[in-house]
Image (spheres, helix red, strand yellow):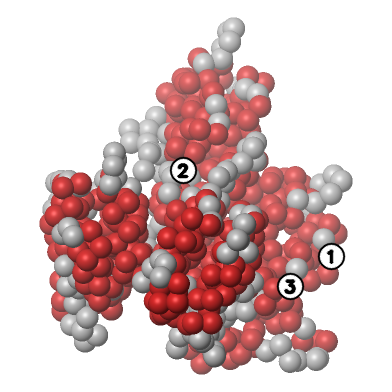
Amino acid sequence: VYRGSVKDFQGFDANQDAEALYNAMKGFGSDKEAILDLITSRSNKQRVEICQAYKSLYGKDLIADLKYELTGKFERLIVSLMRPPAYGDAKEIKDAISGVGTDEKCLIEILASRTNQQIHDLVAAYKDAYERDLEADIVGDTSGHFKKMLVVLLQGAREEDDVVSEDLVEQDAKDLLEAGELKWGTDEAQFIYILGRRSRQHLRLVFDEYLKIAGKPIERSIRAELSGDFEKLMLAVVKCIRSTAEYFAERLYKAMKGLGTRDNTLIRIMVSRSEIDMLDIREVFRTKYEKSLYNMIKEDTSGEYKKALLKLCGGDDDAAGEFFPEAAQVAYRMWELSAVKVELRGTVQPAGDFNDDGDAQVLRKAMKGLGTDEGAIIEVVTKRSNAQRQQILKAYKAHYGRDLMADLKSELSGSLAKLILGLMLTPAQYDAKQLRKAVEGAGTDESVLIEIMATRNNQEIRAINEAYQEAYHKSLEDDLSSDTSGHFKRILVSLALGNRDEGPENLTQAHEDAKKLADVSSNDSSDSLETRFLSILCTRSYPHLCRVFQEFIKMTNHDVEHAIKKRMSGDVRDAFVAIVRSVKNKPAFFADKLYKSMKGAGTDERTLTRIMISRSEIDLFNIRGEFIDLFDKSLHHMIEKDTSGDYRKALLALCGGED
């Protein structure tokens, strides 16, 4: 199936188009609208024919005339569209290695993403256009392992056999693990050989096998073991093997997000993918970034340049509300990866040679007399497990006849006080307190209710109920019922029971459940869409829900999260999305919340504190890994940049390391 956004123009006449372009550039000024309308609605093959017809009719070079008549980014875009793909890539690479410095990102993007045939065509086009050898030029402009991998990719010799050997898959995964994680230093040659030569289908299975045996995705190991441009190149290769469309969607998003636009990247991708997989890129973009590529281009560019880019984009997926197979495949792969068991690890472990009385003495000394030694308090509290902190509370009272919580409250203040006092509570007490704050007083903090109730397991929910009753002398269910309403209330009450199934998946039942979620035709008010989602999402086990979501994708070509966002709104939508994300990948759910708590102006310290406390002994190490995978920066780095003083010191101690 053709997945480009630009197709052959029906009723094409090269001479007629050449004449139209000549007239658009004749005389004073030029008709830019006519130029962009014509060129963006013709395929590359047709544009090449127009160039030939233009020269035959007028004895002039069309590209030279376009360069003369147009300016700036619009000129770059239109001229790029006139070149055959291989010559376009050749020009981009020539520009990337000419002059002072090298545009490594351009080299990486082109050589990591092209097929064998495209690479062969590129090498030939470079030789034809510049009378130079591409490999020799790249060797002369790069170095080290980065150069070696580029040379391997330039051979265009990736295996293309779809028949995969299971034994070789297992061996390659083992070899990659032994070349990196299990080796003192790194055997870069092994990474180059396997990632540079094996077929796409084979490597996808290798990556799945690697996740099983290493307990982490190959991308995370590459970040840990490699560095610099070589690391970026290998990550790009892995991303393109997994999904070329997803790789380019990410590149386009990064080209436009934040201040300024990377126009060279934007032009290069929009031109080079317009007749290959632009529809797939659009779909993945819409799913991954919750806005359409069309709208992001519209907001980030202007004038004829914007109009031409939007024509190449080919449509607005926000307006159409569509969801297509490529995005479904990306979602399905994510569900399959989430089904692989990965060991969850906290960053706070029980201290060895623990002495509760000794710690109580250190804390008393830190708070006695004038001033407070916050550093000593942070050192003790953040380096002990919660169970050990409970022992310190008892030892402090036994030794001094004083309440440690009361002393800490009087000696500390602000964000640090909230963090340290939160760490001294049991997990159930802390969650109960956060829920109480969310429902008491004017207004309700629905985001806190959703975060806690949607992510805790049965045992944790039951412990929270007990702690809530003990602390506030009323049931959590009663407070949730009196402070919320409608379907949202019913979701919270169902979750508050702590009665979710805990068994394995049931394939037959999963198929039926997926059918119920997919059914939009039911007119029975007693079986509303929200009721059906509630009866499944709030009661089925996590392994079973993983299977339900996979069945849903197979059945509808939709990801269940996309379906929820499209068909629901408000707190009900947010609660169901939180459950889905928690089932799919709980560490990634919390990584996303941590990132949002710190990005932009100001910091949401309540969310930051709550997650760092509640996940520190459960899965904060995994959250750190997901954070760097999702946002290309470490959690440690972001905390360091976004907080200050003793609060920052305590958060970094909980974070447990720089990735």
Q: How far apart in space, not on screen, are marks 1 and 2 (Cα)?
A: 36 Å
Give the percent coordinates (x, y) of residue 550: 49, 81
Q: Earlier in the sequence, mark 3 or mark 2?
A: 3
Q: How far apart in space, not on screen, are marks 1 and 3 (Cα)?
A: 16 Å
Per the image, label 2 sits on a secondary structure element best described as helix
Give the percent coordinates (x, y) of residue 576: 66, 69
454 relative to 531, above or below: above
Left or right of 611 on screen, residue 147: left
Front-most of residues 345 and 385: 345
Amino acid marked by disc 1? Ser
The residue at which mark 3 appears reads as: 568
Amino acid marked by disc 2? Leu
Give the percent coordinates (x, y) of residue 400: 56, 20
Decide: few, some or many residues near mark 2? Use Cα within 10 Å; few <14, some 14-19, many ≥20: many
298 relative to 72, above or below: below
The residue at which mark 1 appears reads as: 485
Query: Which dot marks residue 635?
Result: 2
